[in-house]
Amino acid sequence: MYLRAVIAHQLTNCITETVFEDALAQARALDREFQETGQLKEPLHGIPLTVKDQFNIKGVDSTLGYVGRSFAPAAENAVLVQMLKDMGAIVLAKTNVPQSIMWAETENPLWGVTANPRNPAFTPGGSTGGEGALLALHGSILGLGTDIGGSVRIPSSLMGLYGFKPSSSRLPYYGVPVSTEGQEHVPSSVGTMARDLSSICYVSRLVANAKPWNLDPKCTPLPWDEDAFHEIQTRPMAIGLILDDGVVKVHPPVERTLRTLSQKLQAAGHEVVAWDTSDHRDCIQLMDRYYTADGCEDIRRDIDAAGEPLIPHVEALVKRGKAISVYDYWQLNKQKTALQKRYLDKWNATRSASGQLVDILLAPTTPHPAVPHGGVRWVGYTKIWNLLDYAAVTLPVDEVRAGVDNLPAEAYQPRNELDSWNWSLYDVQTMEGHPINVQVIGRKLEEERVLGAACVIEKIWKET
C-alpha cells in the first residue's frame, strides 16, 4: 500500500510527510503476532490509513500549510490517531492542505499545489485535498480530515469518495491544531473519508464505542446507537430535497442526478418534499463574519513567523478581516442561536404528504463537479451545516455525461457575481466522466441516522 501512496504522490503532490519506517515496523509486529496466535489483535488489525497534515503524529510536523510551522515536531499523537493505532491501524503518511487550511482547494508555499488525479489542470478540492487525491488513487484505505465549511465533503465530492462530517463534538479533536484555534463559535469537526460507505460506518461505530470522551473533554458522551442506524433502514423515509440554495445554481449534471435519485427514492416508497432554503443566505453571511472575527490575527501571526507569501485566497481573507469587540462577538453568538432555532423550528414543522416528520435532507455537495484550479468559490452547500452543527455525509452517485448534461437551450441569467462565476465554469467536455456526489444531512448528533439513510439511498440508486 505504501508504494501506491508513493506513486499517488508522484502524480498529484498529495503527501507532506511519510512515516513508512514506523508503519512497516508496526505491520511486521502485527504479522508476527498473527502467525503466533492465529488471531487478529484488534478490529483494525493492519489497516493502513493516512491523515490530513494538521493531525499530530509524534515526531512529525503539523504545518497547516505554513512555512513558519516547519521543524516543530509534535510531542504526542492526536487522540484519534492514538485510538486508531491502538485498534491496530497503521498510519502511513500525512497529506497536503492549503495555507491556513481556510480554503476549499489545496495549495501552500511550503508543499505546493495538489492536483486532481483525473486531470492535473483541475483541483482535488480542499482543505483535505491531499487526502482526497491519495484515496482516489488507492494510496490508503481510510483518511482522516477536518471540516469547518466543507473541507472533508468538498474533496470527497470532487474525487468521487465518501466523506463524513459528524457534529463537532462526536469525534475527538484534541491534538489537531487549526487556524483560529480557540474559537468556539463554529467549531471544526473531525471527519473520515473512504472509497466505500461501509468503512466509514465501521470506523464511526468503533470510535464512538471506544468512549473518546474519556480522552477529549470536548467529546459528547454518546455511544454508537445501533438501533437508530438500523431503524431508518427498515421503513419509508421522508426526505427534504434541496436543488438550489437560492444563491448559486448547480451545474446541469448535479441537478439531473438529484432529480433522478429523487424519482428512484419515490418509486421505492419514500416520500420527497421540497425543502425551503430561504434562510441559507443569512446563515452563510453570519458564518463569514465569524471567520474573520479576530481580524485574521491568528493567520497573520503564522504568516509573519517566516515572512512567507500569502496565497491569493488567504490574502483576500486577511484583507477583509476586521477584528470585533467581545461584545460584538456576543451579538454574533446571539444571532447564531436565533438562526439555529429558526432552522430547528422549520425542520419540526415540515411534514411529508402523509404527515411524517422529515428524516433527512438530500442536497448537492458542491454546485459543480471538479473544476480547474482556482475555480472553487462557493461552498454554501456544505458550510451551512457547519453553522448548524448538523451531521452530513457525501457519497458518489453518478458522473458527468456528455450528450446528456448539456447547458439548457435557454440561456441562464445569473443572480449574482458568484452565481455567474460558477455557471461560467461549466464545460461538459472537459468535465465528462468526473463524479457527481450528493449530500445526506441529519440533525445535530444524528450520525447513525445519516449513515443509515445513506446506505438506503446508495442501495436504491445502484439497484434500480
Image: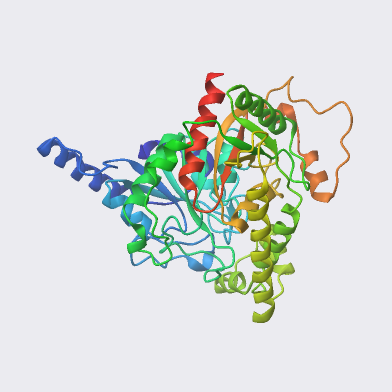
Q: Residue at x 79, y 49 (%)?
A: 418
Q: Residue at x 43, y 58 (%)?
A: 55
**Residue 341: x %, y % from top left:** 65, 60
In the picture, measured across the screen, residue 239 lies left or right of residue 61, that is: right
Quarter of the image where one finds residue 295: bottom right
Decide which of 264, 125 is in the foreground and name it: 264
Vertical relation: 360 (above or below) 85: above
**Residue 79: x %, y % from top left:** 36, 60
Residue 311 visible in the picture? no
**Residue 94: x %, y % from top left:** 43, 51
Decide which of 168, 66 is in the foreground and name it: 168
Residue 376 visible in the picture? yes
Decide which of 75, 111 is in the foreground and name it: 75
Vertical relation: 37 (above or below) 416: above
In the picture, measured across the screen, residue 248 lies left or right of residue 143, that is: right
Decide which of 454, 298 is in the foreground and name it: 454
Q: Residue at x 74, y 54 (%)?
A: 279
Quarter of the image where one finds residue 373: top right
**Residue 272: x %, y % from top left:** 66, 33
